Image: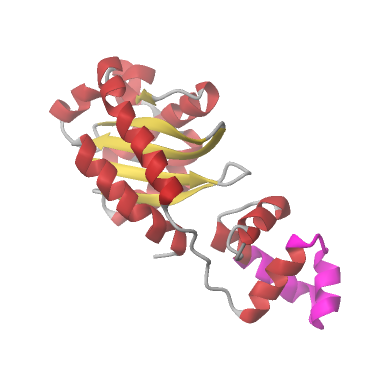
Amino acid sequence: MDNVQALLEPVAEHALRSAGMDCVGLYALDDAGAMRGVILGMPEAFVGAYERQGIPIDPVLETVRRTGSPSSTLVTLGPRWTSCHLYQRVSGRFGLAGFATFPLYTEDRLTGMLYLGALTDATARRLDYEGLAAMSPHATRTATRLLRQPRQAPQLSPRRADVARLAAEGLTNRQIAARLGTGEAAVHKHMKALHRHFGTHTRAALAIAWRDTQPR
């Protein structure tokens, strides 16, 4: 388990218990919109399938990103849920009867997503507008709990930490290689690993993520 998952798991567990749903997902967003997080109550195979295949075709997530408001499979799709690509390729294979997605904000910035899932028809009936309203306070409390979590500095090797520091200073891969006395290909490899580590896709987002782990 990486540091992001370790940070999010206890918060996700609390949201699952308080909401009374069957499964939960909690994801943090970086400045580039990339998502990293944890899913509880579903098999590991589902987690991998959703993160690889499901996120890009998730119509509920797309609605939430576009509107900034909570939504669910029942509200967004209704009876079309079981015929959509997400259900046929991912969710239906693992018995996910539906889910609600709540945006999490830090002040005015979208910083995460809370998923509350249903594995039975009875729980899925809670995914209507009334159910979204009833579950929204759990999303608010989840966002508050995330803000209260201590920052966790990722454990990087000394060389990888040097690459992250120099990239955050604005140096190019060639300049970093010259500064560290190594090859540009090695720096490129470290940068790819750093993006995976921080869940980022751009140098600017990586710089922000790295600075957030440094003592203030």
Q: Looking at the picture, how far across and down is residue 196, in whole percent?
A: 57, 61
- Identify which residue is drawn at 26% across, 16% down: 130
Identify the residue at horizontal 23%, vertical 48% (top origin): 41
Give the answer, above or below, for where 3 lies relative to 57. Answer: below
**136 with respect to 154 (left or right):** left
Left or right, 39 with respect to 125, comes to right
The answer to whether residue 77 shows anywhere in this view is: no
Q: Which of 150 and 157 is in front in this view?
A: 150
Q: Between residue 3 and residue 66, name the one nearer to us.
A: 3
**Residue 98, image x and y in percent?**
28, 30
Against 74, is 15 above or below?
Answer: below
Secondary structure mostly taken by the magenta-highlighted segment of the chain: helix
The span picked out in magenta is 168-193
Q: Is residue 155 visible?
A: yes
Q: Quadrant of residue 117?
A: top left
- Residue visible at 45% across and 46% down? 147
In percent of width and height, residue 113 lies at: 43, 38
Relative to residue 197, is residue 162 depicted above or below?
Answer: below
Quadrant occupied by the C terminus:
bottom right
* Residue 181 belongs to magenta span: yes
Residue sitting farthest toward the left = 122
Residue 201 falls left or right of residue 7: right
Residue located 63% across and 61% down the image: 210
Q: Position of residue 18 (x, y in %)?
A: 21, 39
Magenta span has 39?
no
